[in-house]
Image: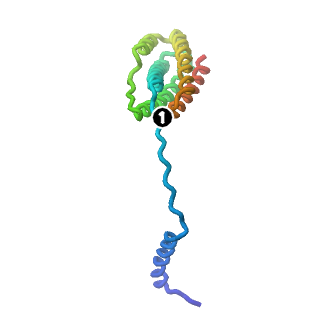
Amino acid sequence: MLVLSRRKALACSPLLVTLFALSACISPGQPPAAPLPALEKAAPFTSADADFVQKLNDMDLTHIALANIAKTHAARNDIALLSTTIVKELTENHDTLTKLATTHTLTLPAKPSAQSQKVIDQLQHLHGSAFDRSYTRYFMTSTTKMKSVLEAQITTSKNTDLVKLATDTKTKLTTYQSEIK
């Protein structure tokens, strides 16, 4: 029976590990690694895509501002509770939209349009049930209009990122409408 001394075993151990590692690297039957596929570039924005991005940006900013007002001005508890969700989800939506626009060298306004700001200012002066009526009416009409814009974008755009964003936004708006009724 062959017994290795501790000294010989420790001296041979790194040598064996190195030989095993090198033998794995020199196997002649291995084919070369396949080249990486080319990165797909996102479809460039068309003028319709840029117009859609501007409309969605304005809608996001307006609904975020109105939902922030609803937290304190609404008489209906369901509107006040939903407003927190709307702010969170539409802010995430807006952040995604901003990243998309930036990659396509499109700069988005940081404030709602003058027409939307007028609505925000009007609703900011209302409280209780008057706020609830006006907010619900505005929300339903604006989201119904926006859903038709979203649907058109989904069916016509070649930009998959915008189509996904439009689809997600349409789903969110449908959910919000069903909860606010």
Task: Pick the quarter of the image with the N terminus.
Answer: bottom right
Name the residue at 53% across, 21% down. 149
Name the residue at 52% across, 28% down. 157
Q: Is residue 2 visible?
A: yes
Q: Is residue 139 left or right of residue 98?
A: right
Q: Is residue 92 above or below residue 115?
A: below
Please tell me which residue lies in front, 149 or 120. 149
- Residue that numbered label 1 is attached to: 43
Indicate how the structure is coloured in the image: rainbow
Q: Residues within 10 Å of mark 1 (few under 14, many from 20)?
A: few
- In percent of width and height, residue 127 lies at 48, 11
Q: Is residue 153 above or below residue 29?
A: above
Indicate the amino acid at tag 1. Answer: Ala
- In percent of width and height, residue 43 lies at 48, 34
Helix, strand or loop under label 1: loop
- In percent of width and height, residue 40 lies at 48, 42
Which quadrant of the figure has residue 45? Answer: top left
Q: Is residue 179 above or below residue 168?
A: above
